[in-house]
């Protein structure tokens, strides 16, 4: 039975000033700090509604825990997408499952031409909080993130992955090592689709740094150069990065010519058989830790975890 989300896809108001909460039970005194979460919080802009649960405007939440007491506050992420939607009172930026329609204020010729323009990537970071180099960020799955002040929940800086490394986007679920080094995955589509393992160093050389020093450790070619797998995350253990090339595929050949459609569902295809032909032995010795998974029957996963227990390092 499909879970009904009708109670989760309405509009709610932000609470920028902290409010007291009712606590059931007792919170240990040694638990202190901010518990941060984000997710979609606004699904209607003017007379327009988003088509998908992943599309709502990002609402950031803070639960401040101090000596057994908890206060709560929330704030909408002041992203470019949020601001232009608010100013125009319509969905002006495409999201995961909702493509924007031509601006009704344009004349007929302008609206016609706008159907052939590539949608601009959203910076609506409604998926996850994460840290890079000790700073807090919120992200979606495009090339944009927002550096956020964990105390005020205000956006400090908009950051573009593509300004630092050659990727078209990155997951919102990186893995951070005990020393602060962070690993992520991102796609690149030129000249053909690749999955890239990204490393972000643990420290900054100056306070204004963001992703400086980020590098692509390894690029894995997609089995089908024009139909890479959709992935939401990847796995990591002590010695391995685990990536599953799933049978849920992005059809890149449809994305460009079908910009006038109103839903991204047509861009996804399901393949019943996916078998990787990659040969790890042909890679650099440094990247033999990449593990290739062979999928022989239909399956898909959204989030992958981090495995603490690991075997011996690869030889």
Image: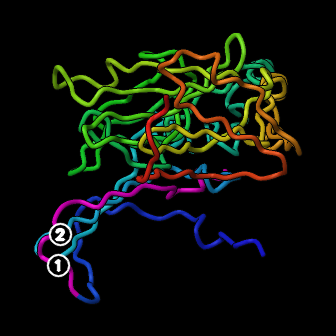
Quarter of the image with the N terminus is bottom right
Q: With 160 as the anchor, is 19 left or right in this view?
A: left
Pinpoint residue 210: horizontal percent, then vertical percent: 30, 26
Q: Residues within 10 Å of mark 2 (few under 14, many from 20)?
A: few
Tell me the SS state at disc 2: loop
Task: Give me the disc on residue 209.
Answer: none
Q: Nearer the viewer, residue 202 or 252?
A: 202
Indicate left or right for 211 with 259 as reference.
left
- Answer yes or no: is residue 263 visible: no
Left or right placement of residue 222 versus residue 150 in this view:
right
Where does the magenta region start and end? 26-49
Q: Cβ–Cβ below 8 Å for labels 1 and 2? A: yes
Residue at the extreme right: 272
Which residue is located at x 63 percent, y 52 percent? 302
* Residue position for label 2: 31
Q: Is residue 25 visible?
A: yes
Q: Quadrant of residue 183?
A: top left
- In terms of depth relative to the viewer, which is nearer, 219 or 278? 278
Q: Which residue is mark 1?
A: 28
Q: Callout 1 environment at 10 Å: few (<14), some (14 to 19), or many (20+)?
A: few
Q: Secondary structure at mark 1?
A: loop
Q: Nearer the viewer, residue 292 or 268?
A: 292
Label 1 and label 2: CA atoms lie apart by 6 Å
**Does 42 appear in magenta?**
yes
């Amino acid at each position: 039975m499909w879970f009904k989300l009708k109670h989760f896809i309405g509009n709610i108001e932000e609470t920028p000033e902290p409010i007291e909460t009712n606590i059931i039970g007792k919170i240990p005194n040694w638990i202190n700090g901010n518990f941060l979460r984000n997710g979609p919080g606004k699904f209607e802009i003017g007379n327009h509604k988003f088509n998908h649960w992943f599309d709502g405007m990002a609402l950031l939440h803070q639960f401040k825990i101090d000596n057994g007491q908890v206060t709560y506050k929330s704030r909408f992420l002041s992203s470019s997408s949020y601001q232009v939607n608010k100013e125009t009172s319509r969905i002006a930026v495409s999201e995961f499952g909702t493509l924007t329609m031509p601006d009704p204020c344009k004349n007929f010729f302008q609206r016609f031409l706008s159907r052939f323009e590539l949608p601009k990537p959203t910076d609506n970071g409604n998926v996850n909080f994460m840290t890079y180099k000790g700073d807090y960020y919120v992200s979606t799955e495009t090339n944009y993130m927002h550096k956020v002040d964990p105390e005020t929940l205000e956006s400090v800086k908009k950051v573009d992955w593509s300004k630092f490394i050659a990727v078209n986007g990155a997951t919102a679920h990186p893995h951070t090592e005990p020393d602060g080094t962070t690993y992520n995955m991102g796609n690149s589509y030129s000249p053909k689709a690749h999955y890239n393992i990204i490393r972000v160093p643990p420290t900054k050389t100056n306070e204004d740094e963001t992703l400086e020093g980020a590098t692509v450790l390894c690029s894995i070619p997609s089995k089908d150069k024009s139909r890479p797998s959709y992935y939401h995350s990847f796995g990591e253990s002590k010695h391995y990065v685990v990536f599953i090339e799933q049978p849920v595929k992005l059809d890149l050949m449809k994305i460009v010519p079908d910009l006038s459609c109103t839903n991204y569902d047509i861009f996804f295809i399901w393949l019943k058989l996916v078998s990787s032909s990659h040969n790890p032995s042909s890679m650099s010795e440094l990247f033999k830790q990449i593990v290739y998974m062979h999928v022989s029957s239909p399956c898909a996963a959204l989030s992958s975890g981090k495995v603490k227990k690991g075997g011996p390092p690869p030889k």
